[in-house]
Amino acid sequence: MKRQHARFWRYDGNHHEGRDCERYDPHGFGLRLIRAMAYHAEHEYSISGVSLSGVIVNHHQGDDFGHQIHVAATAQQWAAMRKFIEENPEYC
């Protein structure tokens, strides 16, 4: 089972201009999709009829401002999450 990897920086600070940002996105998923996968893989069993079993979400140690999150999922899982956020534009 080949996984496609992506990473983003989650802002944990309290500055009003702080925000999440992409760190590594070779497949062009975009920040919104990567964040959604990280969140749902830790809280849901499936999305759009596709199991999220086996999705890897690693939170790396950061600092007072934030930390990096690494997400790895199959192409099918990424596609299901993309479908979910397209069908739910109010999400994220």
Image: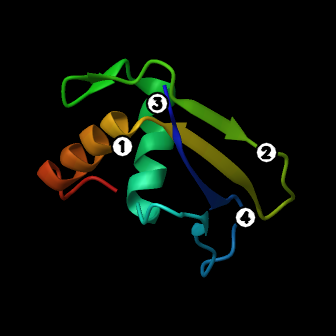
Give the mark nearer the N terminus: 1 vs 3. 3
How far apart in space, not on screen, are marks 3 and 2 (Cα)? 16 Å
Discs 4/1, front = 1
Q: Are marks 4 and 1 in contact (CB under 8 Å)?
A: no
Q: Amino acid at mark 3?
A: Ala
Where does the image place residue 50, in percent across and percent down from the top left? Answer: 26, 24
How far apart in space, not on screen, are marks 1 and 2 (Cα)? 21 Å
Residue tagged by mark 2?
60
Residue tagged by mark 1?
78
Residue tagged by mark 4?
13
How far apart in space, not on screen, are marks 4 and 3 (Cα)? 23 Å
Vertical position of residue 91 compared to residue 30: above or below: above
Discs 4/3, front = 3
- 45 to the left or right of 7: left
Give the mark nearer the N terminus: 4 vs 3. 4
- 13 to the left or right of 54: right
Give the mark nearer the N terminus: 4 vs 1. 4
Q: How is the image coloured?
A: rainbow
| 92 or 69: nearer the viewer | 69
- 3 to the left or right of 70: left
Q: Amino acid at mark 2?
A: His
Q: Are marks 4 and 3 in contact (CB under 8 Å)?
A: no
Q: Circle 2 — which element?
A: loop
Residue tagged by mark 3?
41
Give the mark nearer the N terminus: 1 vs 2. 2
How far apart in space, not on screen, are marks 4 and 1 (Cα)? 28 Å
Report the residue at 47% width, 53% height from top: 34
